[in-house]
Amino acid sequence: MQRVVLATIGSLGDVYPFIAVALRLRDLGLRPVLAAAEEYRGFAGSEGIAFEPIRPGAADMKARGIDEATAVRTVIGDAAGAFDLILPHFEDSFADCSRAIAGADLVIGSTFSIAARIATESAGIPFVTLMLQPIAFCSAEDPPIIKEARFLPWLRRRFGTGPIRLIYALGRTRFRSRRRPVDDLRRRLGLPEVRDELIEGPLRAEKLFALFPPAFAPLPADAPTHAQSAGFSFYNGRQAASDELDPELARFLDEGSPPLVFTLGSLAVFAPADFYETSAAVARRLKQRAVLLVGEHAVAGLRHLEDERIKVMGYAPHRLLFPRAAAVVHHGGIGTTAQALRAGAPQLVAPVLGDQFDNAERLRRLGVAEVVPLERYSAERAARALKKALESSRVRELAPAMSRVDGPAVVAEWVAGRLSR
């Protein structure tokens, strides 16, 4: 049985798609192994998927004095902050990845799987990159919205791709010092010198899969020729495999009109500012029922927001809750975005960091969402935007196109074909 290692790093939103692909690979008779931070061992185990730990995990971060909230604030404060979190552990990551991929027939990695990519190249094993978000292509033809440069699409329309490429080149200089441990390792291993392993490395894989449908974002005109559109992953964790919601939440839903659902996903929820307090005020201002998904760690501290029309929950499976929502207010993470699109739910997006600003803008262009960044999220602005979002039927029209193709199945079928040659 051929062994396929799936290496990823990040939050649950970065792990769930890889578990989804692993399950499809297993269905096709292959032997998947998830390589991720130690805290995700149980998620793999609950599905019967083999697991290999890759540093850094949450314990390694906490040993450096970095908890979840600090990590989120680091990335919010600097677009390159994610690299500052993971690169101090780079040698450990490389050692772990080298062990994990030993004997593998193929490796699948995320854009941030830098150590796995280099270990795989050194071992001569085929590598496939999963591009979970459109921003990962770093396209000059279809430049993303990023927090620090929200003008890039306008600049492209006005002056063409030249200025975009120049800005990207200048941006690479910001990463020069951060790249040093990566470049040093490549030299020690005798690998060819590359211009930018951190940003362009994912594009050099044998195959790239855009794990989102063309209806959300078509491949950009300057995408590598070996890139292929697949579709969203809708895996939402084994805890969501049941067809039943938490009984307490189910009763709340059954007892009244569809509520507004407010969520910040699995990462930004650790640094929410006053998002949930403001959201409760928005619901009251609009005279709407609401469900606040605040994270298990915050339920006790936010229980005071609850009344007969507002329910505070730690977590609820999006695939079960969103179809029963009047609208979904979220951070713009790609997994939450996919679930809201599939449910046909009107959306208000409050992006916080990273790809969320670009995902939010793409939703706005599609006519399925309004956008109020978290830094500007007030009861007045959010209520006004949400009222507008609730008046649109566009998202219900687009919902079928967003879930027509099973992205993980497309990836698994290609891998199986590649390994049968």
Image (tube, rainbow, N blue to C red):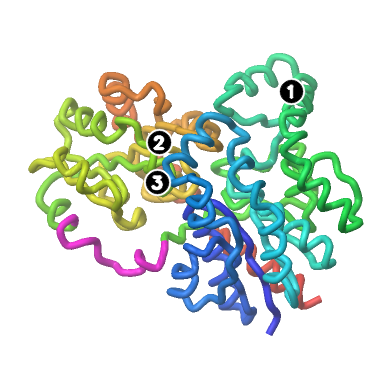
Q: 77 or 280: which is nearer to us?
A: 77
Q: Which residue is mark 3?
A: 265
Is 31 on the left or on the right of 123, as rendered?
A: left
Q: Position of residue 340 (x, y in %)?
A: 39, 46
* Whole-number angstrom distance, CA of label 1 to CA of label 2: 34 Å
Quarter of the image for the N terminus: give it. Answer: bottom right
Q: Is residue 36 magenta?
A: no
> Mark 2: which secondary structure?
helix
Q: Position of residue 257 (x, y in %)?
A: 15, 44
User: Alpha-carbon distance for marks 3 and 2?
Assistant: 24 Å
Element class at badge 1: helix
What amino acid type is highlighted by mark number 3? Gly
- Residue type, label 1: Ile
Identify the disc placed on residue 392.
none
How far is mark 3 from mark 1, CA to CA?
A: 31 Å
Residue situated in front as seen by the camera: 124 or 412: 124
Q: Which residue is mark 2?
A: 394
Residue at x 47%, y 35% (from the top left corner):
73
Residue 102 lies in what quarter of the image? bottom right
Foreground disc of the pair 1, 2: 1
Q: Nearer the viewer, residue 285 or 389?
A: 285
Q: Which residue sits at x=70%, y=71%?
A: 99
Q: According to the image, label 1 marks what residue?
A: 167
The region drawn magenta spans 237-249
Q: Are marks 3 and 2 in contact (CB under 8 Å)?
A: no
Q: Is any part of residue 209 visible from this angle?
A: no
Q: Earlier in the sequence, mark 3 or mark 1?
A: 1
